[in-house]
Amino acid sequence: MRTARLGQDADGLPIMALLLRDESGDIVAYRNLCRHLPVPLDGGTGDLLSEDGAHLVCGTHGATYRLHDGYCVEGPCEGMALQRLYVREAGGDLFVSDAPDSR
Ligand code: FES
């Protein structure tokens, strides 16, 4: 898993991207922001994955998100999904943004 800072949103909150491989090996990216409260999933600890590595888990109240679509399957925000970010691979590098690449 990698993280990248993308600046700030309209409310002045930092946009921190989480880049990881899902169950199929595809690279996905989400904003490191719980859907329950506006806090980072890891609370700054860097600890984001469940013990078995199969889900992202919010360290504050335990919301549990699937890797491949960011959907919350358990916890206070069950039925919601993490904010998806867009990843493009070019020349061995990964580029992530909060809007689809028009190229
Ligand atoms: S702040 Fe993430 S589950 Fe409550």
Image (tube, helix red, strand yellow):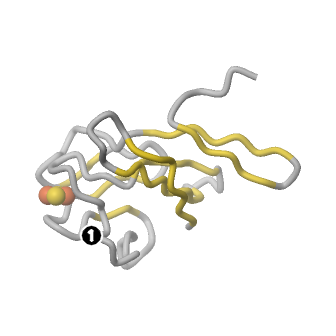
Quadrant position of ligand 1: bottom left
Q: Residue 67 at x, y = what percent?
A: 45, 54
Q: Is residue 103 left or right of residue 57?
A: right
The image quadrant of residue 93 is: bottom right
Q: Going 37% across and 79% down the picture, which residue do you hit?
A: 51
Q: Note whether 14 is above or below 57 in the view shown.
A: above
Residue at label 1? 43
Q: Is residue 81 left or right of residue 97?
A: left
Q: Residue 4 at x, y = what percent?
A: 54, 58
Q: Nearer the viewer, residue 91 or 6?
A: 6
Q: Nearer the viewer, residue 49 or 10?
A: 10
Number of numbered discs: 1
Q: For the residue marked with disc 1, what is the amino acid? A: Gly
Q: Going 56% across and 67% down the picture, which residue do you hit?
A: 1
Q: Residue 63 at x, y = what percent?
A: 21, 58
Some atom of ligand 1 lies within 8 Å of the CB belonging to the residue at label 1: no
Q: Note whether 89 is above or below 20 in the view shown.
A: above
Task: Categorize mark 1 by other alpha carbons within 10 Å: few (<14), some (14-19), many (20+).
Answer: some
Q: Residue 26 at x, y = what percent?
A: 64, 50
Q: Going 63% across and 42% down the picture, which residue do you hit?
A: 87
As drawn, the residue found furthest toward the top would be: 102
